[in-house]
Image (cartoon, helix red, strand yellow):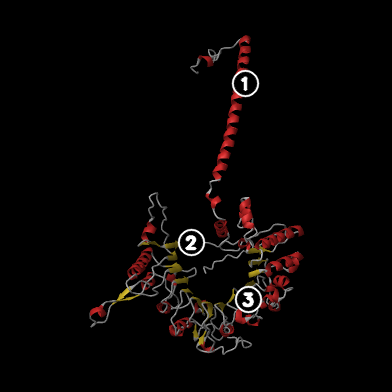
């Protein structure tokens, strides 16, 4: 009980007892409780009042604190640069409120005004063609139109997708007009849909209306029967005659590329891939001759030795050596056809003095996969087994270059050539900086060195600097051992599955790092240290321990930390790639992410 006598209850002597009060005492008790409850209500009201005053004061303080927020003082130009970095990095922006740029318009009025007035934020878009009721479809098309309005007169990058089974009759008539207007403003246009839908959208236009179009990707996503040939629809598309067209990419289009009505002198990039038209080696060389400004070429070659139906660009196709001085990037899936058929070899006598990026794979006949037991049976393939080193087209191509080889990035598959041939080619690439080897899903221990590249610690030792002793009888400075190193500029190694060990990687990186440091300022050629390894090791990945409060490093960081340069070492697990849902029902449900193409090209 309180010590203050004034606060002592007049009934304190009965509190905590089992005594029974008289009727007179109960009446006094009711009067006492009424007064106490009134006092309690007064206190509660005062507490509520103080709580409300505290809340209002706290809100006022927070509002005034926000006036000191550094972001308020950011120049609009800097804030806009931050907004640009908020845009999706691996695909085009979509009509989704939870992704930039639409998300940025929902933060505050000033941000919305800035975002809506910046065409750079609205210059790219991915559209999944909507289906459903007329009001719903019109609502989605109006959103696309408002997006285009925000882009103003800025040329756009546009990606349009439709279901592989879609037909023009599946869509509302307003769709073609709306998407056509969007497409005519596009500088870069990616169209993934059945050719019939593409023709429905594009055909009512003239080639002159595509004045800003520079890059186009066409993906015929329809699953077709053998006798279903949309070739004429493809050839009739007016966008092929766009006056500024520079880059053409095909995915799943079977039409002969050499039949397209392109302005060949203006074409700088050609990509024919993913179950599309596969040119023969002769047709591929005709493409090289016919496009005098071609910079990048990506082809999957056919095993057939088809000759071009007509002269494509002039000049002898089989000219050897064939000098192409403008190609900088070459991505070829080559085929090794039986020499007895005297086929055209794409790389034969090809001189590419400006080549800096080369991706190469070779398809051969694997005798182990053949089910044919009778040699007299009809041959199902014209492919030959892996060629010997002296006949390998890739090795001969590298050896035959009459100029300094400037290749900086090389990508090959592990079964493209023998290990000895690969190491010989690497020794001829002094400017190589990035090396990528696609090993597939099998371990390198299962490979035959006569038919594939072996990625183990011995491979790392071959890429490490080593001393070569001078012959006996040398004196003075001539007797000093010389330094031998393959790919002195190599800084990035990506080999997927391999048989490297952590110890082998550590020795490899340390040796290259030490050589890089010692070569600086000595007058000797400068060598690069390894700055990135992207590997999948057979052994378990090491434990990654978080940095402690003192800034200490985990064991792996300390292992690959040389002279202040930390290595970006990546351990990866094989995971199933997840793509956005590509289909929806015929209701008013709309997936803005449907058909989004994720860009995995590090270029």
Q: Is residue 502 left or right of residue 251?
A: left
- Residue 324 in the image: above or below residue 146: below
Depth check: give the residue in front, 47 or 434.
47
Q: Name the image quarter holding residue 314.
A: bottom right
Classify mark 2: helix, strand or loop.
Answer: loop
Q: Position of residue 38 (x, y in %)?
A: 62, 21
Q: Which residue is mark 1?
A: 38
Residue 573 got which mark? Answer: 2
Classify mark 3: helix, strand or loop.
Answer: loop
Classify mark 1: helix, strand or loop.
Answer: helix
Q: Which residue is mark 3?
A: 245
Q: Position of residue 587 (x, y in %)?
A: 72, 58
Depth check: give the residue in front, 246 or 82.
82
Q: Position of residue 259 (x, y in %)?
A: 65, 82
Mark found first going from the N terminus, 3 or 1: 1
Q: Residues within 10 Å of mark 3 (few under 14, many from 20)?
A: many
């Amino acid at each position: 009980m309180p010590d203050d006598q004034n606060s002592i209850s007049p009934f304190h002597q009965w509190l905590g007892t089992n005594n029974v009060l008289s009727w007179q005492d109960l009446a006094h008790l009711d009067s006492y409780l009424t007064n106490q409850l009134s006092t309690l209500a007064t206190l509660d009201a005062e507490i509520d009042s103080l709580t409300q005053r505290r809340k209002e004061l706290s809100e006022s303080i927070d509002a005034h604190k926000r006036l000191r927020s550094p972001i308020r003082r950011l120049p609009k130009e800097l804030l806009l640069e931050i907004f640009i970095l908020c845009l999706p990095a691996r695909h085009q922006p979509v009509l989704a409120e939870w992704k930039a740029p639409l998300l940025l318009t929902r933060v505050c009025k000033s941000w919305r005004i800035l975002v809506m007035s910046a065409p750079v934020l609205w210059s790219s878009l991915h559209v999944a063609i909507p289906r459903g009721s007329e009001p719903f479809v019109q609502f989605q098309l109006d959103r696309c139109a408002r997006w285009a309005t925000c882009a103003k007169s800025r040329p756009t990058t546009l990606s349009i997708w439709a279901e592989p089974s879609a037909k023009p009759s599946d869509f509302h008539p307003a769709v073609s007009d709306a998407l056509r207007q969007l497409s005519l403003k596009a500088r870069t246009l990616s169209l993934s849909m059945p050719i019939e839908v593409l023709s429905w959208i594009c055909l009512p236009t003239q080639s002159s209306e595509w004045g800003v179009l520079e890059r186009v990707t066409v993906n015929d996503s329809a699953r077709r029967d053998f006798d279903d040939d949309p070739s004429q629809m493809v050839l009739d598309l007016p966008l092929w005659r766009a006056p500024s067209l520079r880059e053409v990419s095909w995915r799943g289009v079977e039409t002969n590329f050499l039949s397209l009505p392109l302005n060949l002198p203006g074409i700088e990039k050609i990509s024919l891939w993913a179950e599309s038209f596969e040119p023969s080696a002769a047709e591929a060389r005709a493409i090289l001759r016919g496009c005098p400004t071609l910079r990048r070429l990506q082809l999957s070659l056919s095993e057939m030795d088809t000759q071009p139906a007509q002269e494509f660009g002039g000049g002898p196709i089989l000219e050897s050596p064939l000098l192409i001085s403008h190609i900088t990037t070459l991505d070829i899936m080559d085929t090794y056809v039986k020499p007895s058929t005297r086929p055209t070899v794409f790389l034969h006598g090809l001189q590419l003095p400006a080549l800096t990026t080369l991706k190469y794979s070779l398809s051969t006949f694997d005798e182990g996969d053949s089910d044919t037991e009778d040699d007299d049976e009809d041959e199902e393939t014209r492919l030959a087994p892996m060629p010997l080193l002296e006949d390998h087209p890739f090795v001969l191509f590298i050896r035959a270059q009459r100029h300094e080889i400037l290749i900086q990035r090389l990508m090959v598959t592990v079964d493209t050539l023998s290990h000895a041939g690969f190491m010989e080619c690497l020794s001829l690439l002094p400017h190589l900086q990035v090396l990528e080897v696609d090993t597939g899903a099998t371990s390198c221990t299962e490979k035959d060195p006569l038919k594939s590249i072996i990625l183990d610690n011995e491979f790392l030792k071959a890429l490490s600097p080593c001393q070569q002793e001078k012959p006996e009888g040398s004196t003075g400075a001539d007797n000093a051992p010389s330094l031998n190193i393959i790919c002195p500029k190599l800084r990035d190694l990506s080999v997927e599955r391999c048989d490297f060990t952590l110890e082998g990687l550590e020795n490899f990186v340390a040796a290259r790092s030490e050589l890089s440091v010692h070569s600086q300022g000595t007058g000797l050629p400068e060598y690069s240290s390894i700055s990135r390894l992207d590997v999948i090791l057979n052994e378990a990945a090491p434990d990654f321990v978080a940095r402690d409060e003192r800034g200490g490093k985990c064991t792996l960081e300390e292992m690959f930390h040389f002279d202040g340069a930390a290595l970006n070492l990546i351990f990866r697990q094989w995971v199933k790639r997840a793509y956005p849902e590509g289909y929806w029902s015929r209701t008013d449900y709309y997936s803005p992410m449907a058909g989004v193409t994720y860009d995995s090209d590090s270029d």
